Image (cartoon, rainbow, N blue to C red):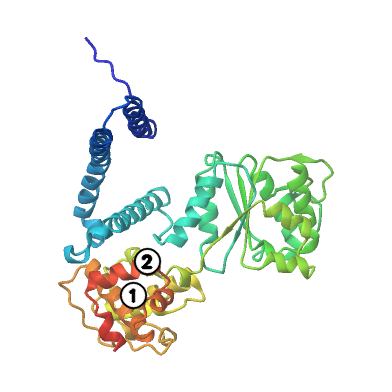
Amino acid sequence: MKQIRFHISPYVIIPLIFAGIAAGSAIVAFRLAEGGLKETYVSIAGIAIWVVLLAAGAFACGLLIIRAILRPFEAFVQRAEALPALAGARDAPETVEPGDRLEHYARVLDRVSDLLGKVEASQLFPEIVGQSKAIRSVLSQVMKVAPTDATILISGESGTGKELVATSIHEHSARKDQPLIKLNCVAIPEGLLESELFGHERGAFTGATERKIGKFEMAHRGTLFLDEIGDMPLNTQGKILRVLQEREFERVGGGKPIKVDVRFVAATNKDLENMVKTGQFRKDLFYRLNVFSLQLPPLRERKEDIPLLAEHFLSTGKKAVRVSPAAMHMLTAYDWPGNVRELQNVITRAAVMCENNVIGPHNLPDGLHVDGLAFATHSEVNTSLSLDDHLHEIEKGMILEALRKTGGVQVKAAELLGINVRSLWHRVKKYGIDVKALKE
């Protein structure tokens, strides 16, 4: 015979239990008062006994409920701490006071959540290298907007990967099986831009010997990506606006309207809002484009991705090359005004020029010696260390440098490193850094 089970939410059963205890207490108190016991001391004693019994029962019920809830939670935290990926989340036993257990659990759960976010980013966007919170925030927005047909404006400095994000938007959309057509507005001369976008009829202008299909027609039912749209001439902007509004256009030299179904994605490295104020960009077009805005972070705001990016660029080469800790320290300290593209160029050049397949500080451009930081200049590397050990060595060095600069003040050091104070405190404990000595 099949056993019947009833499932009741803890949000219902727990309040009911304590409500029952409270109701029972009220009934017992009423009965004792109603009994009319002759001797006052007997009445008081009886009430006291019932109060103690009810309090003990309530305490036992509460203890059982909390144990039932926390026991699997504590087991999960212990299993999570045992994982190699979360080994750094374990606090030394002597540092965890009884009152700090909940804070310790919160830190472990933060690490678990952070790790799951990194796994999701790497699996859903394998072509985008990066696991920082800044880039994962962008990818989270991409996942929300990609399935829709909303027009998207991607903003960011040159070299931040705007085209790569536009490709990811298309690949995670309902139009992924349809064409993705790309056009860089800067690469096309002003006189030919309209012909590239809308196509032209034969004889429309000198040299138009045959009909040409434009980018809008090629992108029918798919996605059209216009890069550097801030450099588009004003007269062409007006015609783009008409296509966005009416979903139709005419070829250059033609008179027949052509209907299109296109998902529109644009990108720019300029401040379009300021260009609208100065009359360099059409206000109505800006509002049509800015339905959903994505702001890509520059590389200087996600420096924790630099080791991953460097490893990725080196993995595409023909020989196995790695970066020395001293050189990696320089790479992570630099501000990278050219962003990921500049980093790729530096890594590619250094890989060609390095000796013994190890990139040292002397293989990097002089411009990377910045902020007055003192970097090691030796090129020898302990080959017995793994990549993780090298990265830990670099991380510890950066933390020490930040603490020295701020006189051991962890709040200021955390701001300098771009991380929160809790994260810095955890790393200080992990590497056994004596902050008091740095203050002195």
Q: Residue at x 47, y 76 (%)?
A: 336
- Three-letter amino acid code at the position of disc 2: Phe
Please state which amino acid type lies under the numbered disc 1: Ala
Q: Looking at the image, which residue is at 24% across and 15% down?
A: 3
Residue 365 shown left or right of residue 36 in the figure: right
Quadrant occupied by the N terminus: top left
Q: Residue furthest top?
A: 1
Is the C terminus in the top left, top right, bottom left or bottom right quadrant? bottom left
| Residue beneath the point at 40% across and 68% down | 420
The residue most toward the front is 38
Vertical comparison of 67 with 215: above or below: above
Quarter-of-image position of residue 302: bottom left
Q: Position of residue 386 (x, y in %)?
A: 20, 68
Q: Earlier in the sequence, mark 2 or mark 1?
A: 2
> In the image, residue 104 lies at what x, y percent?
28, 58
Q: Is residue 270 above or below residue 143?
A: below
Disc 2 secondary structure class = helix
